[in-house]
Image (cartoon, rainbow, N blue to C red):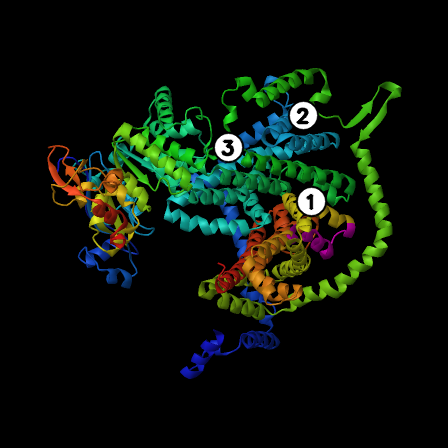
Amino acid sequence: MTEATAQTGETGGGFSLAAIPLWAQFAAIIIFGVLLSLVWDGATRWPEEWIVPAAPWITEFIEWLKSEATIFGVEFKDITRGIGAALKAPVKWAEYLLYRGFKGIGLGPLPWVAVAAGVVIFAHWVGGVRLAIFCALTMIYLATFNVWKDSMKTMTIVIVAVPMAALLGVVLGIWVTRSRTASRIFSPMFDLMQATPHMAYLAPVAALFAFGPVTALIATVIFAMPPMARCTILGLQTVSSDVLEAGQMSGCTKRQLLWKVALPSSKRTLMLGLNQVVMQTLAMVVIASIAGATGLGHKLLYSLQQLRLGVAIEQGIAISLIAIVLDRLTQAYAYKETDHFAAGKSFVQRHKHLLLFLVILVVSYIAAEFYRWVKIPPAKFVWGSGDAKTVLFDAKLLARHMDQAIRDFNVVAFDYINPIRDWVTIWILLPVRDFFLWLPWPVFVGVIGLAAWRLGGLPVLLLCLALMFSFIVTGFWVETMKTTYLVLIAAALCVMIGVPLGIWAARSERVANVIMPICDTLQTFPSFIYLIPAIMLFRIGDFANIFAILPYATVPAIRYTYLGLKRIPPVTVEAGIANGATRWQRLWKVELPVALPEIMLGLNQTIMMALAMTAITALIGSTDLGQEVVRSISTQNFGRGILAGFFIAALGIIADRLIVSWSAERKRQLGVA
Amino acid sequence: MPADVQIKCRNLWKVFGADPKGFLRRHNGAPTAEALADEGYIGAVQDVSFDVHQGEILIIMGLSGSGKSTLIRCITRLNDPTSGEMEYEGRDLLKLSEKELIDLRRHKFGMVFQNFGLLPHRDVLENVAFPLEVQGISKADRVERAKAMIDLVGLGGRESYFPRELSGGQQQRVGNARSLAVEPDIWFLDEPFSALDPLIRAEMQDEFIRLQSLLHKTIVFITHDFEEATKLADRIGIMKDGRMVQLATPEELVLNPADDYVAEFAKNAPRERIVSVGAIMQPATDSASGTVSSTAKIGSVAEQVLTSEHPVAVVDEASGNVVGSIDRHNVATSIFGTRAA
């Protein structure tokens, strides 16, 4: 096709861009940009006097909103205050229920025994004995490792945020399927929101609402809502036409058709949406500790900052276990099937799980009056009394031992680790970083712009240009390049690790059976906990940050490679075999080229996750956009934080548009779209 | 027009494309096949007119893509026609308000779907009671009515099963029961047996005949299976490329196909079960021995005629008069075609 266009260009006699080879176009742009930077300093650094002071403007605007603005005669600050107060109520009730207790009526919080029993009984109901055992072990861990109360604090926001995000998502999802206008507004918005890292949400919300659990709640709800909306849209759009028509012919009104036919028929998809909401909520809640959420995330951050790694590990394991439990429970609930065996059984038989829980609840409330350990798990477990006391288990002591062990380990290991870290930092990381910092912006803009134009045409070009200039003209070039450099290096490493693993898994069922569950589990954990091993081994710095990104962002590279290879039609592979290709030839000449569009979508996901994780590494120290967000919340300089969050999202959007356009075009060419 | 016409369709068009109504207007309501193709429109239903009579089984037959499913969706207003007229018992179907349409579906229409369209989250009883539930009928009443319907289709005892726990044939029965629960005047069936295995399909066809012998509904039935059509139909309408090629009794289709397309279908039809003696008889002759009824199907008298040395007299049942005769040669050619002669 390129040849044909080139020929038309020549015979037409006039100038045609397509007649110039692609590499030459890129080379021309790069040379032009570099030359420009030699004669004009403004190409290296956007001239100081041209910088648009957007950050102070936003900060001032927010100040104005909070002090003077009125909407329809109502003061803006009253609106935010009202929302804050309205949201505080459910948070308060959840706090009473889970760890504060209802002081007014002299009723304590749910005894931990009752909560633990409730989780285990629910697990047994939805998922059977194995899930129940796993949940029981998790509950025992939370109780014995001194993290019960913090877990409950975290769960407070989760149990308030999940119903709100789910409800909001369902309502918006329904609206999108019913109104073309809503669809035009919200569908692209949901896409963007899902590509936007956690951190970007925190600054704007923190700017409008005071530091505290309500801010964390709002940011969490906004962050966790899009998957629910998308699952609702997907569910409603995929209800089989027979079912819908049967509903219509049964004489349903529009409302009946929605509530009695369409929504219940898409229960499975809605439940998977709920699962994602729960997981996103948990991931956000632990990060929202910088905006005022208390609980495990807060404590973990504190432990990490103080390098109390033993405690950090205990807390990290707690978060991970909670994540796995929530994930498995919601999934089991989504796949739970109703069958006819329930009919004809007695009330007690049908509701034995619920009745058992109620009994335990009442008994434990009464027992809690007499035995304190029923109410709150003891700090340490002691056998006997008086002088004969022996400490069976003390989580704090264990943490101190772990701290010591890690210190001892590091003293030895640093002799080996430090040279590697330093070598990589000096010879790879710093040169790449310096390259990005040296890079004249016209080169960056030109290369990305040309790629955008070739891949997606004018709309993608304009979008990318607008996003790129937004961080150039506001003076965020350096921070953005630091983020870009970290993300690109991390993504490259993820691909180097993930693609071979994906190929290996696709080749061998046995390997797949090992790797894929690990991938599932790695994706279940809130990204925050990946900071722990990074700090443990490498302290702070770019090397540690990249190390923290790897386990999180490699998963999509593995998974999409695996799926891409698995989805190749057998005929294609067999044709390769029939033509006498060796195993390697088959892989390089047949399988990988056909699977490449899918693998590239994996790369896209990897970049998104690397971006999200890069921002989170700001919690332990970095100097890029994520750090701007974190700092803005503590200094109340919200303009910079909001912009930095937006630029993190902008980088994601640029990468996403480029890769998705390429992949779609390639799939079209391969005829597998 | 006979008084027993229940549904009347005149010049129905259903065109898919960018601006179907404008397109029809530009072509004065009757575009040619070339015009459709040139402008990128699809004429799923083209200028179809027919009546459905009270109590008859009208079968619309055609290959996939012939427009039969679209036609039935036009009549039930699941898919509004682009132009044309439709009446149900004298009421203009296209001028019904939303409320009137829902009312009609709640009380007069029942429909069965190819993939049954059962609600996966409801058990058999709740599925069958569903049309009654949306009408707001009390729980006791609808359970009683649904149970009666479940018994009627032979699924008694499986009320609390969920659709995924049932076989295809059982799901089909649930679909039947649900569509009959409101005691509709007219029963639409859209390829109800196509998703079933051949053996089950035959069983469900017999079941259908049994139900109709009890209920005597007016039925509009869609199928792509000519044999199924001839087995069940009073009249068959054959569709091709959106047009109704011929609408007639099975016997007429077999004996006088309107064109090659219909003839191609009729060729493999079980003629002995379709064609009656009266249609192939010759003038009466004195040498006749024995009698057969003029309305009897050939298959049912074949043995008698083929074993008789002489032609057999054909008698009109009503008057008792001899109206013609039939011999071995007639029977053989009418069953096997002229090839056998």
Q: Position of residue A43 (x, y in %)?
A: 58, 71
- Residue A605: x %, y % from top left: 58, 54
Q: In terms of sequence position, does the residue under pointer 2 or pointer 3 come before the other? A: 3
Classify B72 as above or below A9. Answer: above
Residue on which the image places disc 3: A86
Q: Is residue A106 left or right of residue A311?
A: left
User: Is the N terminus of chain B in the top left, top right, bottom left or bottom right quadrant?
Assistant: top left
Disc 2: host chain: A
The residue identified by callout 2 is: A112
Distance from disc 3 to disc 1, alpha carbons, whole Å, reads 32 Å
Question: Are the residues under marks 2 and 1 on the same chain?
Answer: yes
Q: Is residue B328 left or right of residue A146?
A: left
Q: Main secondary structure of the magenta part?
A: helix
* Residue A549 falls inside the magenta stretch: yes
Magenta span contains residue B174? no
Q: Earlier in the sequence, mark 2 or mark 1?
A: 2
What SS does tag 3 mark? helix
Q: Is residue A607 visible?
A: no
In the structure shown, which secondary structural element does the residue marked by tag 1 occupy? helix
Range drawn in magenta: A537-554
Closer to the camera, A461 or B137? B137
Q: Chain of mark 3?
A: A
Where residue B48 is drawn, which disc sits there? Answer: none
Residue A529 disc label: 1
B319 is higher (above) or lower (below) than A577: above
Residue type, numbered disc 1: Ile
Residue closest to the eye, A277 or A555 = A555
